[in-house]
Image: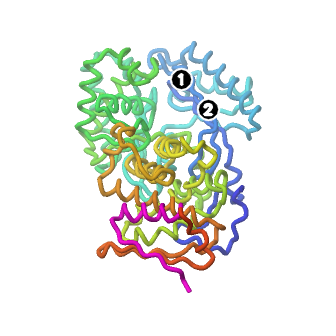
Amino acid sequence: MDGTSEPQERDWGPFGRPLFDDASSRKLSRVGVVDVGSNSVRLVVFDGAARSPAYFFNEKIMCALGDGVSETGRLNTTGKERAMAAMQRFQRLADGMGLEPLTAVATAAMRDAVDGQAFAEEIEAATGIKVWIIDGAEEARLSAQGVLLGWPGSYGLVCDIGGSSMELAEIEGGKVGKRITSDLGPLKLKALKGGQRGRRAAIKETVAKLAAHMGPQSNRLFLVGGSWRALARIDMNRRGYPLKVQHEYRMRRKDVMETAKFIAASDLEELRQACGVSSGRIVLVPYAVEVLKELLHTFKPHDIAVSSYGIREGMLYEQMPQALRDRDPLIEACRFAEAKDARLPGFGKTLYEFVSPLFKSAPEERKRIIKAACLLHDVSWRAHPDYRADLCFDNATRANLGGLRHSERIYLGLALMYRYRSKLDDSQFAGLLDLLTPEDRLQAEVLGKAMRFGAMLWMSRDTEMGTFKWSPKKKILRLSLNPHSWPLYGEVAQARLQSLASSLEAELSVQLKT
């Protein structure tokens, strides 16, 4: 059940052998990192499959260390008190969890303040936590690596906005390229003299310098940081977007402009409550929006994606061997879930091979979602049968999984619902299915029903279940069962197969292999 029993010589096909229990990955199974930012101090403890980790613990304290640094040159006094208390709590928690020494980095506020280094030394003396004050280029690199944790092989421009700075980094082919830092953090913009006109002039001048350094960047713009995530929440609220998952949320330039107007016309306190944004964050969002508008005007990205992964995830990525970095985070996470929670770990691959003939023409990016569904098809077996299907859908659509677009989350969740239920009530989805095309909805139904039937032929993970042959033009579905599987083809299995054939609008033929 722990994933250690897979033989080395087994053919894993295009997805490769699981690495989550390899020695180099196992040491990353529970890692704690601390991000001492200008606005917040956060502890994250990663656990599970290292390539797509779960958040075992995640706590943030809004300390506003950088509030006033521009005017005084020193860290905010109240912020220091709150940050020290947070660090003492975090160390006590780490001790209780049995963690290795915490990895802690501090960013713009600590590096800009004249008392930043002294405060880092105070923290170490009081807690034993070594706080590394990193420069802007290193902050940009770590944030970009966080994006690569969720989007391996991605390309575009990463924009990480904190309280006192904003970093840009270029990523292409899984590598971090040019990077640069700036003072375009909301806390510093708030302190600028000259009001909105003065801010706009400063933002325009700074972004022009950034563009001169970075060169043309018209690919995807990845938004990293709490102010951007708050903006995404507000945009979702304005649009009535049905899936409240910020990671991989997409916006267009038009959306940003409309949301900027929406924010300007709204009462911030009412907006904060409606969107679930903290009071310390909502006051910074209008300044962040001013920066984003100028970035979009200057770089003209073809696409905007929000990333929940940033510097903390980049710190984990930093510790990964290259073989692990190269893996698909979705597949690794699903394999880990199967090894931990399924009744028969390893059967997901057998099931995938069984249903694959139904999806021969599917592109590779869709086949990886089908593979993920097969790996997850049995991980919710402990749930009450009446709620199993709903639980599967909720887990797939809202779980912390990297490498999934929102439409793919819905597809995966829908397929897993059909794995446990032959008919669905569309009214319960409140607009979520609108994120899928009718063709994708049908394909998810077919996949779910194929898994539902395949689970009836379960004997062992390496069993030869039988063979499907699907002729989409002739609408004929053939199933050949070997003598070992034939006794499993009982009344319930027959009904499930007939349901699959009905969804395909297919003529069904079943035969015994001789």
Identify the residue at image location x=31%, y=32%: 240
Q: Pick the residue in front: 142 or 327.
A: 327
Tell me where the magenta segment starts and ends, as one range.
Answer: 492-514
Q: Pick the residue in front: 258 or 300.
A: 258
The residue identified by callout 2 is: 43
Residue 13: % across, % down: 54, 72
Q: Left or right? Give the position of 37 relative to 202.
A: right
Estimate how packed mark 1 is, as few (under 14), some (14 to 19) or many (20 or more) residues with alpha carbons within 10 Å.
many
Identify the residue at image location x=42%, y=37%: 246
Q: Amino acid at mark 1?
A: Ala
Q: Amino acid at mark 2?
A: Leu
Q: Quadrant of the N terminus?
A: bottom right
Identify the residue at image location x=26%, y=36%: 255
Q: Is residue 403 visible?
A: yes
Identify the residue at image location x=41%, y=61%: 365
Residue 5: % across, % down: 73, 64
Does 269 sit above or below residue 495? above
The colouring scheme, among rainbow, by chain, secondary structure or one colour, is rainbow
Estimate how packed mark 2 is, as few (under 14), some (14 to 19) or many (20 or more) residues with alpha carbons within 10 Å.
many
Q: Based on the picture, tell me whether residue 54 belongs to the magenta stretch.
A: no
Does 71 sit above or below residue 309? above
Labelled pair 1, 2 in contact (Cβ < 8 Å): no
